[in-house]
Image: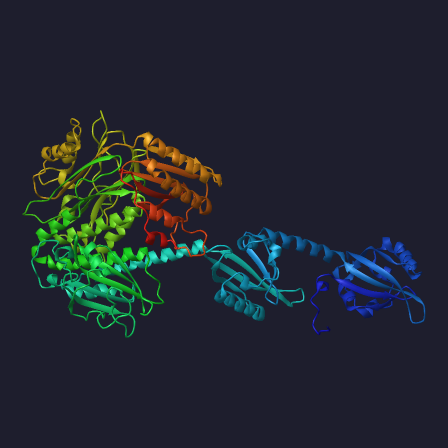
């Protein structure tokens, strides 16, 4: 088909020209392309001898001979140097094809076709470079034609979507993406082709062939033209940004949650009025966290009954008709004309299922999720119904000082993102903060007694147990003439039979200090369960403390005034009863993580007194841990110190009330502590009593917390540790190693379950991890299995569809193990599960509901 514009073919790139020679050997016809190639117009070229005009002088004689042969009827093809007048007389090289012809009068003539060899060489070079860039690109590269079918794709693109690169020719966007995403990409391709405007960072979402997970791609699109400027298609450069998207989403969620917690700290609890505090909670939660929310408080709490601690808990006041009486004190909604929240999520609300009105007194049915949450003190998830507009609800008991004071329900409507595990934690924290404020109002008249109950209730119950440690602890409150302080200690079990030991002290006194201690201890336990490094725990705890210490969001006062953190703050600065409100929330803390396998303990310190250790046959010494700044000051990183402790060594953590008083300076108290600890070895409980009875602990000026731990590392025969190569047969090898180790430990009853779960974890490490795989079995009070690899992506449990052939591994791990989880390591991650040791009783079989939950 003829067209007015240049054809846009290969001739646009190859410089092809033609001219004819008459019977007299002179140029008779001269094409426009010849004029462009030789730099000579037709009126200048016609009538001239081509040999004389273009060939170098030394080649002209041979040229005249060749022209004569051609005019005699002989065809000729060859390379001919020529001089380009338009380029300062520079020489070029042309490939010439000469065909004899005849004029209208029967005379012999010739037709010459000329190709610029330099243009051919440039095309060859450009093609080679294009192929190298296209084929070796680490990104997916695809070229769509003007009909939006794939013209060409590189191997990287084929690796992601399967098959060979040539297999993708002729495919469309519908072959790669689901309907809505395919339509969006198709519309974008059409717009780029029509307008020529490039598109950068087009975000696309879809599954990979054979996979069920959602992948995210960033695609850059631009229009491609021929040499003549005609559009020939659209090129696309695709990058898999799934990891970046997940990390950004998690970071955004974490920032949002931290901002919400910071707002809650500033806005909840500004009043001692119970209803006002409940409304403040909902003002924070709606709409930032949920769409609907309600708060119910126990009627006895609102009427001011002076009951014993715990009497508000439903276990004491339950009846066959349901929970104890509650009053709805607040509700909020971000949805126009929406009911506050359905009761117990029991389907479409009928006449008897309407939510209680604001201010009404009611009971939750005995078996409802809300009543169960009140009884257990645990969060209950209430699924939405098909007929209503509520998608899901979290029934969160409001627990303060181990006492349930009411219930808050957070709901999200259909169309919103459902609640996740992180939302459950945040909901619990929001409810806990509000509950503490509400309970503070109830305890206002008896601050000292109730604060003391709070403090004792937050200490570890009974004698804490830990793998590889023999632990004893003591807590001595100040006398009745002094306000309660904020001292606390904790023993937290971590994965892999590791143990976190914590001792802290909130500066200031009274109910505020006790509440701050409770908040910080809760935060420590939450951060410890995330399995962060000790310095990271203190850094995060510092952020929490700074949020607590800024009432109304104002500027913090300079509580430490230029001490620089090099020395421990003076007692006057820490314990002054006239402390500013912001100083109440300054705190010191030492956080240690002990690994019984290596007998190594990692310490981090936030302005606290140094731990003491006594190794067999050696005098007591203070461990040199950089003290750092107290929690709530901020601005300085915390340092870690790792110490290997000898077998039977005695580790001691304590608060300043043990070594400091008005009559005893700090240095003298530390020397006295080292002297007492160096004494004769005795049972740990006796050692605690000996320390308290020997030192000056009867001053009553400050609370005293003492935590002592005898080091008992796991024996070598209780540890199985192997490194496996990254190959499929390592799965079978891991099962064999686990079976052999359990048989050696006489744990035959756990062999089948352990083999199955080890196989799942090692398979996941091969499929999704990186580097070598490490398998470790630990036997102590429970059996712990750990699988290590160098990958950073954490495992995520999901519900497999009925047609899926896989995706149920982590569901099996969750059903068959007592506990499981994962944690990051300096060089990757560790996935672990825990099994209870056999007691001789037959193992419980999985219920039908548990098995069906996997489908």
Q: Give residue 306's position: percent from left, percent from top.
A: 7, 58
Image coordinates for residue 558, horizontal then vertical, percent: 21, 52
| Position above or below: 135 against 615 | below
Which residue occupies 23% across, 54% down? Answer: 378
In this view, 57 is above or below 620:
below
Residue 460 falls in image quadrant: top left
Q: Nearer the viewer, residue 852 or 824?
A: 852
- Specify whether 36 is left or right of 157: right
Residue 554 visible at all? no
Q: Is residue 7 visible?
A: yes
**Residue 293 sits in quarter:** bottom left
- Percent across and percent down for residue 59 are 86, 54
Q: Where, quadrant-wise, is the N terminus in this rendering? A: bottom right
Q: Residue at x 12, y 55 (%)?
A: 316
> Horizontally, is 501 left or right of 124 in the view?
left
The one of 482 and 343 positioned closer to us in this rendering: 343
Residue sitting at x 80%, y 68%: 31
Nearest to the observer: residue 609 or residue 280: 280
Q: Residue furthest top?
A: 617
Q: Position of residue 437 (x, y in %)?
A: 17, 59
Instruction: Tell whether 442 sits left or right of 420.
Output: left
In the image, residue 676 sits, relative to residue 815, either above or below, namely above
């Amino acid at each position: 088909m003829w067209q007015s514009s240049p054809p846009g073919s290969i001739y646009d790139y190859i410089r092809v020209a033609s001219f004819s020679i008459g019977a007299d050997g002179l140029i008779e016809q001269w094409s426009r392309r010849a004029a462009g190639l030789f730099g000579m117009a037709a009126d200048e070229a016609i009538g001239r001898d081509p040999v004389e005009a273009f060939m170098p002088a030394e080649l002209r004689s041979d040229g005249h001979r060749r022209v004569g042969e051609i005019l005699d009827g002989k065809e000729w093809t060859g390379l001919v140097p020529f001089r380009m007048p338009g380029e300062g007389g520079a020489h070029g090289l042309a490939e010439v094809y000469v065909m004899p012809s005849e004029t209208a009068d029967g005379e012999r003539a010739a037709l010459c076709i000329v190709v610029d060899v330099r243009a051919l060489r440039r095309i060859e070079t450009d093609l080679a470079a294009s192929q190298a860039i296209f084929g070796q690109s680490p990104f997916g590269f695809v070229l769509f034609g003007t009909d939006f079918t794939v013209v060409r794709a590189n191997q990287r693109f084929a690796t992601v979507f399967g098959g060979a690169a040539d297999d993708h020719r002729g495919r469309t966007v519908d072959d790669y993406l689901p309907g809505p995403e395919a339509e969006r990409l198709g519309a974008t391709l059409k717009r780029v082709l029509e307008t020529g405007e490039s598109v950068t960072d087009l975000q696309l979402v879809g599954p990979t062939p054979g996979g069920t997970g959602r992948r995210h791609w960033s695609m850059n699109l631009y229009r491609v033209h021929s040499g003549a400027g005609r559009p020939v298609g659209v090129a696309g450069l695709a990058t898999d940004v799934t990891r970046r998207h997940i990390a950004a989403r998690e970071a955004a969620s974490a920032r949002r949650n931290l901002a919400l917690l910071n707002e809650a700290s500033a806005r909840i609890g500004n009043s001692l009025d119970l209803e006002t505090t409940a409304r403040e909670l909902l003002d924070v939660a709606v709409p930032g966290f949920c769409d609907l929310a309600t708060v119910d408080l126990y009627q006895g709490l609102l009427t001011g009954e002076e009951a014993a601690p715990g009497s508000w808990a439903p276990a004491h006041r339950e009846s066959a008709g349901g929970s104890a009486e509650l009053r709805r004190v607040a509700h909020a909604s971000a949805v126009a004309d929406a009911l506050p929240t359905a009761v117990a999520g029991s389907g479409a609300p009928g006449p008897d299922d309407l939510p209680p009105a604001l201010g009404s007194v009611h009971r939750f049915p005995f078996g409802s999720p809300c009543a169960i949450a009140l009884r257990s003190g645990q969060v209950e998830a209430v699924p939405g119904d098909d007929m209503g507009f509520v998608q899901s609800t979290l029934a969160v008991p409001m627990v303060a000082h181990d006492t349930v004071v009411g219930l808050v329900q957070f709901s999200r409507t259909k169309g919103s993102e459902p609640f996740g595990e992180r939302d459950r934690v945040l909901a619990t924290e929001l409810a806990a903060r509000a509950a503490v404020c509400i309970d503070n109002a109830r305890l206002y008249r008896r601050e000292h007694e109730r604060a003391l109950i709070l403090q004792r209730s937050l200490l570890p119950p009974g004698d804490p147990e830990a793998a590889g440690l023999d632990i004893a602890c003591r807590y001595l409150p100040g006398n009745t003439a002094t306000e309660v302080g904020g001292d606390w200690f904790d023993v937290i079990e971590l994965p892999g039979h590791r143990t976190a030991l914590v001792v802290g002290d909130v500066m200031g006194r009274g109910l505020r200090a006790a509440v701050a201690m409770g908040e910080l201890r809760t935060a420590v336990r939450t951060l410890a369960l995330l399995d962060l490094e000790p310095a990271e725990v203190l850094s995060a705890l510092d952020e929490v403390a700074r949020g607590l210490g800024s009432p109304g969001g104002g500027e913090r006062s300079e509580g430490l005034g230029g001490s620089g953190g090099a020395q421990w703050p003076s007692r006057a600065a820490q314990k002054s009863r006239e402390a500013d409100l912001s100083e109440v929330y300054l705190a010191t803390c030492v956080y240690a993580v002990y690994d019984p396998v290596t007998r190594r303990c990692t310490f981090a310190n936030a302005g606290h007194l140094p731990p003491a250790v006594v190794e067999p046959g050696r005098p007591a010494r203070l461990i040199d841990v950089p003290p750092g700044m107290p929690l709530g000051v901020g601005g300085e990183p915390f340092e870690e110190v790792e110490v290997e402790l000898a077998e039977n060594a005695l580790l001691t953590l304590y608060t300043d009330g043990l070594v400091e008083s008005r009559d005893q300076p700090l240095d003298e108290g530390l020397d006295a502590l080292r002297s007492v600890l160096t004494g004769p070895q005795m049972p740990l409980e006796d050692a605690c009593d000996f320390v308290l009875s020997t030192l000056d602990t009867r001053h009553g000026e400050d609370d005293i917390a003492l935590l002592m731990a005898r080091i008992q590392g796991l024996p070598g025969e209780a540890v199985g540790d192997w490194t496996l190569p990254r190959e499929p047969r390592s799965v079978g090898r891991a099962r064999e190693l686990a079976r052999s180790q359990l048989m050696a430990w006489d744990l035959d009853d756990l062999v089948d379950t352990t083999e199955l779960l080890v196989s799942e974890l090692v398979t996941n490490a091969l499929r999704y991890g990186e580097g070598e795989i490490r398998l470790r079995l630990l036997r102590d009070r429970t059996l712990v299995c750990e699988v290590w690899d160098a990958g950073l992506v954490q495992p995520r449990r999901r519900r497999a569809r009925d047609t899926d052939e896989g995706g149920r591994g982590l569901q099996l791990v969750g059903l068959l193990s007592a506990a499981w989880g994962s944690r990051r390591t300096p060089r990757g991650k560790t996935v672990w599960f825990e099994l209870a040791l056999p007691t001789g009783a037959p193992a419980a079989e999985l219920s039908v509901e548990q098995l069906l939950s996997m489908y």
